[in-house]
Every structure is written in structure tokens, then in C-alpha cells.
Amino acid sequence: MPRRRTLFVDSDILVVGGGMSGCGATYESRYWGRDLKIVCVEKANIERSGAVAQGLYAINCYMGMQWNENQPEDHVRYARNDLMGLVREDLGYDIARHVDATVHKFEEWGLPIMRDPKTGRYQREGKWQIMIHGESYKPIVAEAARKAASEVYNRIMVTHLLMDKQRPKRVAGAVGFNVRTGDFYVFRAKAVIVTAGGASHIFKPRAVGEGMGRTWYAPWSSASAYALPILVGAKMTQMENRIVLTRFKDGYGPVGAYFLHLKTYTQNAYGQDYEPTWYNSIRERVGDYVDRHPVPTCLRNHALLEEVKAGRGPIRMVTTEAFKDPHKETVGWENFLGMTIGQAVVWASQNIDPKEINPELTTSEPYVMGSHATCSGAWASGPEDYAPSEYQWGYNRMMTVEGLFGAGDAIGGSAHKFSSGSFTEGRIAGKAAVRYVNDLGQQQPQVSEAEYEDLKTIVYKPMENYEVGRNEIVAGTVSPSYILPIHGLQRLEKIMDEYVGGIGAHYTTNEPLLTRGLELLGMLKEDLAHLGAEDLHQLQRAWELQHRVLASECVTQHTLFRTETRWPGYYYRADHPKLDDQDWHCFTLSRYDRDSGKWEMEKAPVYHIVD
Ligand SMILES: Cc1cc2nc3c(=O)[nH]c(=O)nc-3n(C[C@H](O)[C@H](O)[C@H](O)COP(=O)(O)OP(=O)(O)OC[C@H]3O[C@@H](n4cnc5c(N)ncnc54)[C@H](O)[C@@H]3O)c2cc1C
């Protein structure tokens, strides 16, 4: 094995992940910490990384307070309703009250936001969404972060967090490797902000084999935002609350602009409106949540799924009427070209002209992400002026590990942040982290040489496994002594699909399935010690897999713990098919003990702060 260089980087604040929230955290840390050293580390290149890499067509979280369109309280009510009653209202309110200022900055930095020619206000796509020419959204935001950071380290995958050698419950930095040069990096920091995005590819996707990379959520979002904190004992919340999206079939093209702006609608294979058919059955499961407006996202999925199971699929989006209007036709195509070009290509390849044919819709495999219409992530301390005392134990957005902050997909309980809310939450975390660093005084954390040297051995182990093991084979990819990351990934996806409620199981699971799923995940974890990586690219895949597996275990533990079906349409506990507000109007919390490998589960109260 070649000797790998170890490079040391010291900082006051280390931001792990340079996506939307990471850029927000970097930008704001500099604003409050003029003299501090702020370092952002990213496994890709912040110019085009994260879920917004390809651009977006709408900013999904904007209040419009300057025009009195919405108030932060309205957004809290909306998110609470969509999440079937369970959100951290303090966190949601905190973002909503600041998000408009963030969007105004984006415009100032050059993001073209569409305006309504009549009113001069931002063009609304829906109550919360405004439309943008967003192909360059990410480079624009990244520029602000680049200028604010002391240093940005691109192409470094962070694999583990480091803890203080004096106080093992306090974070002290992180380690990772450069995916191009193979150098090992030890980042020593006083505070760490984890913003490393959510998780795709933990459940088997609809597109496998040749289409495997085609998923709705970014395939490079590999659960690091969850695995990094989990591994150091941070409490996680609502990890069972995975998201399933209704999307255009095969290309995962988004439907929001179609419903909201083009006013298209859905029907079954026989041209019927199917949602009313399932009203009574949904009501039986969830009570009057089905009568709320807007109808929660999961419940709309439920009707689609039941209709398909009843044999009246496929479900189609009626585009032929809207596309007669040339303006709407343009908007329909541009919506994809600015964000999901693949959908336009899929339609072209399948002879679908939405002016002539109503395209099919389907539901995606589940994803885990805390910034979209679900709530998975770390349990974080809330804003000092607004959070109930039980939600406050330190600085705003600090996890239950001292000095460890998070934002975006990383923070749980606060859905509907989207791109603008994630950047805003990054800013909130950055500001709080600066205060934390300033308050530290002489009490600075220190990393242990033994810890990072051990981690160095562990990080490169898959390359060693490969080098030794490949001598046992003459051709092919299957070796008796290692598994390749792709094999491990496929095994993970199969377990999650079959046992934890993926597409193959109609999103349905129960206690025996989950228990068996955990056993199989345990066996997979044993085998991960024998991952083989042919090169640095595969080494990255190996560590992405490690992160995905740990996050998946967490999802499974949470799903087992919550003995109700709170979000039909996202997943079903067949042994507890109804929503149970009496016992489960609460958050679920987990804590992983890396020494014993055990998970502790508990409930936490949901406080309704907004009436
Ligand atoms: C398909 C799709 C469509 C969307 N559409 C919209 C929309 O129309 N409007 C809207 O407002 N929002 C939209 N969103 C939501 C928005 O993109 C997210 O809410 C937002 O990007 C979340 O920010 P984040 O910082 O948590 O994650 P990301 O922006 O994904 O950033 C995470 C970053 O961490 C990096 N990273 C990951 N692991 C590591 C590691 N181990 N080491 C170092 N770096 C790492 C990643 O490379 C990435 O740069 C959409 C999201 C998706 C997936």
C-alpha cells in the first residue's frame, strides 16, 4: 500500500458539506466571526454540489412578508398540517421568520427571480413557492460561501467526526480523504457544523441496472448528514418519517409546477378522478387529518397507491389541456430544463409529447431527508427566544453533542425548509456556532493522535482488503474475501425494500419484518469490515455505503419503535394500521452507542406553540 500523507487543517468553525445549508453556514459564520478561521469541506465541488447541483426552477420557501402575503406562523401551521401534526414549531418558526431575507440576498447576488408583470411582486407558483431562472442557483450561492470562507476544501469526503480527548462528549473536528489524491485530512476545529445532505439509495430504487443512477433525490446524497452525528452519539429524531414522492414515471420529473401553475390534474387509467374513492378509507385510518387543507402530501400518495393496487392504474397527469396554451407549454418544458433535464429526455425517448399524451405518474422509493416534506434528522436545541425549555440545552441548532451543529437535511423535526430554508438554517447555525466558539475562551478542544491514526487505518482498509483479496481471483468481480461497494449497496437496498417498507413491499412493514430486517442489517454491518475498494473512487463508494447502512439501521429502529401508521402513503405498519394520537402524538428519539452497537429509543413531547 502506498503511504498516505496526513495533512492537518485547523479552524475555528468547520462546515462539513458545501450544499445549500453549508454555504449558508459558511457565509453567516464569517459575518459574525470576522476574525475566525472558517473552513468548508466538501466531497464534490461546492460550485455544483448537493441537491441543487443541477439548478432549480422554484424557491419553495418564501413568506413574502414585504407584501403581507404570509407570516411565519402561517408556515408553521402549513408544515404541521402536512406532517400530520408533528413538527418542531420552534425550529420551523425560526427559519420562516428569516427566510425572506435570505431570498433577497440571493436576488442581490444575481439569481434571476421571476416577477409578476401586473403586481411587480415575485411570481408565485403556489402559496409558498416563487419561480426562478435557477440553472445557476448553486454557483451563485457557492460564490458567496467561497468569498466568506477562509478556505474551501473540495473533493474531500469526511468519514468520521473527532472528539475532544479531555471531554469525549465534545466534538473536536473531523477526518476524511481526498477522493483524487488519496491524502488523509485531519480537520481540527472548535465547532463543527454538519450539513452533508440527506439520503438516497437506501431503499431499492425503481430504476435498477442500467438506470440505477436515476433517482429523484441526488444519488450522491449518501446519508453522511445522519451517519456522522449518529456515530458520535447525537440523538436523532423522526428517522422513520421517510418521504415518498409522486413524480412523472421513469424520469422523476417534479409535479409541483404542473399542479400549481399549469393547473393540471390526475386521473386513473379510465379517465376517472380517483381521490374521492379513497376518502372514507383514509378517514378511517387518520381521522380528520384528511379534511385539512391542503391535504397532507402522504395522504395524496395513499389514494394513488390504493388506486393502482385496485388495478386501475396507471395514474396519469392530464397535460393535454394545459399544453394547448403556448405559455403553459413553455413553462412545462422549462420546468424540467431548469431542474430535471432527464425527464424531458425520457419523454422524448418514449415518444411522449405531453400535448398529445397524458404522461404516467408513479411513486418513488423512499428517501430520508430533513429539509423537504419530511422531518428526519438530528435532535437540535432551539432558538433561545422561542423554544420551550425542553427543546433548549445549548446554542441554537446545536445537537446533543457539545459543539456539534447542523442545518438543512441534517436537522430533524423541521420539514419544508427546502433550498432557501436550508440556507437560512445554515445561517442560524453559523451564527450560533460563532457564539459558541467565542464563549469557549481557553477551553479549546484537542484531538487525540491515537484516535486519528486509528481512523486513518480504518478509512483505507477497503483498499488494503482489495489489494490482498484480488490475488484470490483471476477474473470477474466476486472474491471470497471482500465485497465491493456496489454489492453491499444492492444488498442494503434489498433489505430495506423488503423489510422496512420499500416499493417491493408496497411501503408496508410490521414488527416481525423490521426485526428480521435489523438482523440482516447487522449481518451486512459485519461484512462491511470486508469491503474492497479498487481505487479512490471506490473508496468513496465504500464510505458512502457505511454511512447509508448506519442511517438505514436508524430508520429501521425508529420504524419499529413507532407502533402506528402516522403517514400512510409514506409507509404502513400493517400491525398498527391507524394513526394513534393518544400514544404517538410525539417525536421519536434514538441514540446509538458505538461501543455496544445498541440503540436507545425514547419519546419527546410535541409542543404546539402556534395556535
Ligand atoms: C430532486 C430535488 C428537487 C428539489 N426541488 C426544490 C425546489 O424546486 N425548490 C426548493 O427550494 N428546494 C428544492 N429541493 C430541496 C433542496 O434542494 C434541499 O432542501 C437543500 O438542497 C438541502 O440542503 P442541504 O445543505 O441540507 O443539502 P445539499 O444541498 O444536498 O448539500 C449537501 C452537501 O454535502 C456534501 N456532502 C455529502 N456528504 C459529504 C461528506 N461525507 N463529506 C463532505 N461533503 C459531503 C454534498 O456533496 C453536498 O454538497 C429539491 C431537492 C431535491 C432532491
Image (tube, rainbow, N blue to C red):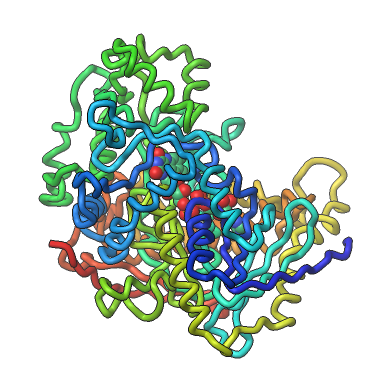
User: In the rendered image, which quarter is residue 395 located in?
Assistant: bottom left
**Where is the C terminus found, in terms of image quarters?**
bottom left
Residue 578 coordinates in the image, percent (x, y)? 20, 54
Query: Between residues 138 and 369, which one lies in front from this camera angle?
Result: 138
**Where is the N terminus found, in terms of image quarters?**
bottom right
Query: Between residues 380 and 190, which one lies in front from this camera angle?
Result: 190
Figure check: 342 above or below 504: above
Residue 416 coordinates in the image, percent (x, y)? 33, 51
Residue 251 coordinates in the image, percent (x, y)? 47, 29
Q: Residue at x 27, y 48 (%)?
A: 63
Query: Between residues 190 and 538, which one lies in front from this camera angle?
Result: 190
Residue 609 coordinates in the image, percent (x, y)? 18, 67
Residue 171 located left or right of residue 362: right
Residue 211 located left or right of residue 296: right
Residue 83 located left or right of residue 465: left
Figure check: 55 above or below 317: below
**Residue 498 visible to the viewer:** no
Q: Residue at x 84, y 52 (%)?
A: 470
Residue 532 located left or right of residue 378: right
Q: Residue at x 48, y 26 (%)?
A: 337
Number of numbered discs overlaid on the protein picture:
0
Q: Residue at x 51, y 69 (%)?
A: 229
**Residue 20 visible to the viewer:** yes
